[in-house]
Image (cartoon, rainbow, N blue to C red):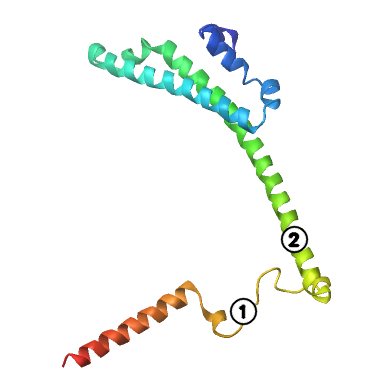
């Protein structure tokens, strides 16, 4: 970001932009990044709305969109600054969230493997050692194997059709 662009921001806005420098972002955890993301998004929204509102009001007075937007360029530039800053924070937040999700998933899978291995070993030590093909899913036998949402719907439809036919016969 150029010093000229930063000079048009007030002190609080400059501080907000400085918080989004890579060194500052690297030190933040996910919750702190979410809070920063919210503050930057609010600033971006503020200047975007302000620019649109002022430009919209100017169009009637200037009778031209081009002249209306030109008179409001400072606000537009502030909105663009905060749009860029928001993109930076969003990318960092996405990376941290993805890393956090991967860690949580790994922990959850490790816990599930530990519980399953412990439960299987306690129930039947011979089965716990064998590598069965079911991979944690229960093996279904008989009619349960054929039941799926589609087959249940088909069976219900067939029953309904039969009941309608019987009702027609009974009413004769």
Disc nearest the viewer among 2 and 1: 2
Which residue position is annotated with label 2? 115
Residue 16 rendering spot, x and y as whole percentages: 57, 16
Q: Is residue 25 above or below residue 116?
A: above
Element marked by disc 2: helix
Q: Is residue 70 above or below residue 156?
A: above
Q: In terms of image quadrants, where is residue 167?
A: bottom left
User: In what quadrant of the picture does the C terminus appear?
Assistant: bottom left
Which residue position is annotated with label 1? 140
Residue sticking out furthest to the front: 122
Q: In terms of image quadrants, where is residue 70?
A: top left
**Towards the viewer: 45 or 36:** 36
Q: In terms of image quadrants, where is residue 33?
A: top right
Which residue is pictured at 32% across the width and 81% down the height?
160
Element marked by disc 1: loop
Which residue is pictured at 72% across the width and 58% down the height?
112
Residue 17 rendering spot, x and y as whole percentages: 58, 16
Q: Is 35 situated left or right of 152 in this image?
A: right
**Can residue 66 be seen from the camera position used here?**
no
Q: Earlier in the sequence, mark 2 or mark 1?
A: 2
Q: Is 165 situated left or right of 148 in this image?
A: left
The span from disc 2 to disc 1 (Cα, nearest Å) is: 22 Å
């Amino acid at each position: 970001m150029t010093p000229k662009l930063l000079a048009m921001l007030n002190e609080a806005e400059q501080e907000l932009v400085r918080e989004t420098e890579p060194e500052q972002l690297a030190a933040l955890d996910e919750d702190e990044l979410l809070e920063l993301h919210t503050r930057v998004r609010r600033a971006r929204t503020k200047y975007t709305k302000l620019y649109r509102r002022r430009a919209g009001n100017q169009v009637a007075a200037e009778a031209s969109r081009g002249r209306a937007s030109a008179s409001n360029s400072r606000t537009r530039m502030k909105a663009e600054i905060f749009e860029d800053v928001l993109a930076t924070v969003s990318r960092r937040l996405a990376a941290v969230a993805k890393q956090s999700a991967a860690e949580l998933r790994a922990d959850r899978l490790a816990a599930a493997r530990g519980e399953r291995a412990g439960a299987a070993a306690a129930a039947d030590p011979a089965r716990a050692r064998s590598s069965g093909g079911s991979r944690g899913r229960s093996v279904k036998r008989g009619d349960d194997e054929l039941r799926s949402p589609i087959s249940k719907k088909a069976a219900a439809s067939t029953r309904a059709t039969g009941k309608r036919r019987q009702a027609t016969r009974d009413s004769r």
